[in-house]
Structure formats: C-alpha cells, structure tokens
C-alpha cells in the first residue's frame, strides 16, 4: 500500500483539497463518498487526521470503516 505522511494526510481534510481522508489504526480511508463526512466534518470531528484515539467518543464501532477502500498507510 502507498505510504503517506501526516502532512500529506492533513491536506485531505475536505477544505484545502477535495479529498476527504481519515486515518484509523495506521490505515488511511477515503471517506469522500460519505454523506456523513461532507466538507470533511463529522459530528465535531475533522478529516485529514489520525482519528484512532477519537473513536471512543463515537456511538459506533470501527465497523463503520469496513465499506471504505483503504487508500494507503500512514507513515509512522
Ligand atoms: C461524537 C462522535 C461521533 C458521532 C455522534 C458519530 C455518529 C455517527 C453516526 C450516527 C453514523 C451513521 C450510523 C452508523 O454507522 O452507526 C456514523 C458513521 C460513521 N462514523 Fe461516526 N460518529 C462520531 C465519531 C466518529 C469518529 C471519531 C470517527 C473516526 C474515527 C467516525 C467515523 C465514522 C465513519 C467512517 C462512518 C461511516 C460513514 C458512512 O457510512 O457514510 N465517527 N457516525
């Protein structure tokens, strides 16, 4: 899988670039097709970042990522 840095990810926040990407447990997902992530925001959470630690605030599990295609990996 292609590897992206945090600064590359941060541009894919739905504002600076059209792409809406989120990293979870080292994998980057393209959430551009989601109605729930329009403009890169989702219930006070912002795309373009690693949101692994924020999933605990969600009323859902990581299963929500299953239908999205990984676009790459986040560089350590
Ligand atoms: C206050 C925090 C949050 C709330 C209230 C919230 C609420 C929701 C709701 C209601 C859904 C759709 C129903 C469902 O699949 O259960 C959803 C889907 C989703 N959530 Fe969250 N969420 C929160 C935080 C997060 C965080 C932190 C992440 C990322 C780590 C996240 C990632 C997603 C994804 C990827 C989907 C699927 C979108 C889709 O299918 O189009 N959510 N969320």
Image (tube, helix red, strand yellow):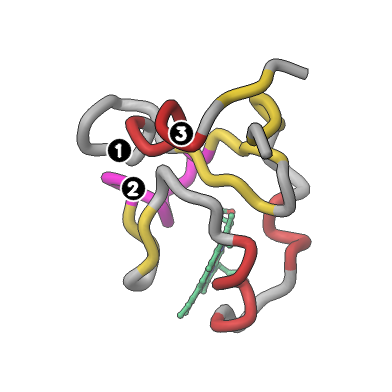
Q: In the image, what residue occupies the spot 55% across and 72% down?
A: 54
Question: Which residue is denoted by mark 2 in the rendering?
Answer: 40
Q: Who is closer to the viewer here, 10 or 44? A: 10
| SS for callout 2 | helix
State the CA–CA distance, disc 3 to disc 2.
12 Å
Answer above or below: position of 36 versus 40. Answer: below
The mark found on residue 14 in the picture is 1
Disc 1 from disc 3: Cα separation: 11 Å
- Cα–Cα gap, marks 2 and 1: 4 Å
Secondary structure at badge 3 equals helix
Q: Main secondary structure of the magenta part?
A: helix
Answer left or right for 47 relative to 18.
Answer: right
> Where on the picture, by quarter, is residue 46?
bottom left
- Mark 3 touches mark 2? (CB < 8 Å): no
Magenta-drawn stretch contains 37: yes
- At 61% from the left edge and 70% from the top edge, which residue is drawn? 53
Neighbour tally class for label 2: few under 14, some 14-19, many 20 plus, Cα within 10 Å: many
Q: Are marks 2 and 1 in contact (CB under 8 Å)?
A: yes
User: As displayed, is residue 71 above or below residue 74?
Assistant: above
Please state the horizontal and vertical placement of residue 42, each as a whole percent of the image: 39, 62
Residue drawn 30% across and 26% down? 18
Left or right: 69, with 16 as reference point: right
The secondary element bearing badge 1 is classed as loop
Tell me where the magenta segment starts and ends, as one range: 31-40
């Amino acid at each position: 899988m292609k590897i992206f840095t945090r600064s590359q990810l941060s541009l894919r926040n739905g504002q600076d670039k059209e792409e809406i990407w989120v990293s979870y447990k080292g994998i980057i997902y393209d959430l551009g097709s989601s109605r729930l992530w329009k403009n890169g925001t989702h219930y006070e959470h912002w795309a373009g970042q690693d949101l692994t630690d924020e999933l605990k605030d969600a009323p859902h599990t990581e299963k929500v990522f299953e239908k999205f295609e990984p676009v790459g990996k986040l560089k350590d």
